[in-house]
Structures are given as C-alpha cells and as structure tokens.
Amino acid sequence: MLAVRDEALAYGTAKALPEGLPEGPSRFSAPLPLPEATRQVRAARVAPEGRCRSQGLGWLVVIEPPYVRVARAAYDAMAEDYVDFTRHSLAGKPFERAMLASYAELVRTSGLPGPVAEVGCGTGRITAHLHALGLDVFGVDLSPGMIAVARRDHPHIRFEEGRLAALDIADESLSGVVAWYSIIHTPPEEHPAVLAEFHRVLAPGGHLLLAFQVGQAGDEPFHLAEAFGHQVALDFHRVSPDHLTRLLADAGVPVIARLLCEREESERTPQAYLVARKR
Ligand SMILES: C[S@@+](CC[C@H](N)C(=O)[O-])C[C@H]1O[C@@H](n2cnc3c(N)ncnc32)[C@H](O)[C@@H]1O
C-alpha cells in the first residue's frame, strides 16, 4: 500500500488514502518507479485525462498528464503579472460583458439551487464579475499561485485548487459552470473528457459558458516560451466553435447561444463564446 501511495504522490495527487498512512506533499515533479500493483491498476482504469480509480481498495489515485503540470508551472510563475495585465480588461470588452451578463441572468432565473463554479478562474477577475452580477459563485484553478492572488484580491469569494477534468465537486450540484479561456491549454483530444466532467457536476437544466480562441481542426497549437519575463512552455490550442458545439451536443449539454468576435488588432485569433444547457 505504501508503494501505491508513493506512486500516487509521484505522478499526481493522492486522495482518500487508507487510514494510518502518513500525510505528505501532494505533488512531486520526479516520477518514482511504478510498483506492480499500481501499474496494473493504471493499465486497467486510467481514463482520458489520467484519472485512475480503485473502488475495491478504497482509494483514489489521480495521475496528472504533463500538459497540466506545464500549465500550472507557467501560471504560478506569472500570477502577479497576470493580475496586473488583466485588471481592466473587461472594461474594453462590451461583447464579453454582454455574454457574462446574459449568462448570469439565465442562471439567476433558472431557479436551480446550486452555486456556479468558474473553472480555470485564474486570479478571479471573472469570478468577481459574476459575483457582482448576483451569482453565488466560487473559483477553481490548478495554479496555487493564481489561487493565492484570487484569495488575496477577492477575500469574499471562495477559491479552491482543482483540475478541469477531475473536479472535486459532487454530481449534479451546480447551477452553472464557466470555463473562461481555461480549456485553451487542454489538448483537443481531451476535450470530450473535460466536457463529460462539466456534464457530471451540472444539475439538469444547468448552464455552461465557454470562452476560447478560434482555430480550425489540425491547427498547430500556439507555443509561448516567454511571458512577462518568465520562461514558460505553454501551448494554446485553438478550436472551431462548430467542433465544440458538436462535442457539447454529444456530451448532453447542447449549445443554446453563440457569439463570434472577429480578431482585434491586439489579438492573434477571433474569439468565441458558447452558452450551453444540460438536458
Ligand atoms: C488564460 S487564464 C484565464 C483565467 C480566468 N478565467 C480569466 O479569464 O482571467 C487560464 C487559467 O486556466 C487555468 N487552467 C488551465 N488548464 C487548467 C486545468 N486543466 N484545470 C484547471 N485550471 C486550468 C490556468 O491555471 C489559468 O489560471
């Protein structure tokens, strides 16, 4: 069992471990050798974003794919710069504010009891905007650095560490999910798993809002090697609104509204916004 725990810690996050095991740090960058028992469990049960579950033994192992570690490191490094860079960005974006306001109204009038999660909330600027629009909202992000800034700047709002494809949120407990430029670092082949997770946590009738940069199938990701003077290795995956619309329908969260904004001078791509509702 200890060996299994070691592997879990080496590759990701160990949760609900058997009683009596010592607590330790939750992440390591250097992988340890895989014990045989864990190798078998991984082979049998690893799901698309690397989730691994053993019901029989009563523990859960979450294995992180490399792109998650890379994104965490990048956003940890640039958290303070990011908050300055985006501080007033909504002010010059009337269409973004319109989508957020329409979404907030849809959720408020849906009558559903649960809160809204902004997943991939970063420093919490959109979470705070949604809160000001009257939503009961909390933020989730994989970067402890971004979460620390969000908690500091918005102490009245709850922020938690977590991952898009493995949210620590109960089934069907949310009236809404907002992923505002947060699926952009997830490789497109992982999008069905992420959308399935959004479907799992949304109550029937709950609303999803996605914002992302537009691209076409087969586009190479845009690679960023430096941001605000920090060395990073961040990939931006662009997708087409039509493709995501199809995936959302397949996931049981069909699109009810979409907005496409043509590329502005300061931008590399057009921007898309989709609102979807769980059946
Ligand atoms: C471009 S920022 C957007 C932040 C915020 N939504 C905003 O608009 O200011 C992308 C955020 O998504 C987070 N993120 C990227 N991939 C993630 C994942 N798989 N799980 C959770 N958060 C993720 C990053 O840590 C980062 O804070």
Image: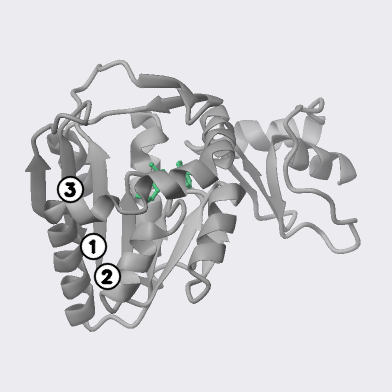
Q: Which residue is mark 3?
A: 273
Q: Secondary structure at mark 3?
A: strand
Q: Residues within 10 Å of mark 2 (few under 14, many from 20)?
A: some
Q: Position of residue 107 (x, y in %)?
A: 22, 73
Q: Amino acid at mark 2?
A: Pro
Residue at left 50%, top 64%? 153
Residue 105 in sight from this viewpoint: yes
Cα–Cα span, label 1 and label 2 = 5 Å
Q: Earlier in the sequence, mark 1 or mark 3?
A: 3
Q: Is residue 127 toward the left or the right of residue 278 in the image?
A: right
Mark 1 and 2 residues: CB-CB less than 8 Å, in contact? Answer: yes
In the image, residue 107 sits, relative to residue 178, either above or below, namely below
Q: Which residue is mark 2?
A: 204
The image quarter in which residue 176 lies: bottom left
In the image, residue 138 sits, relative to residue 26, either above or below, namely below
Q: Which residue is mark 1?
A: 278
Q: Position of residue 146 (x, y in %)?
A: 53, 50
Q: Position of residue 231 (x, y in %)?
A: 56, 23
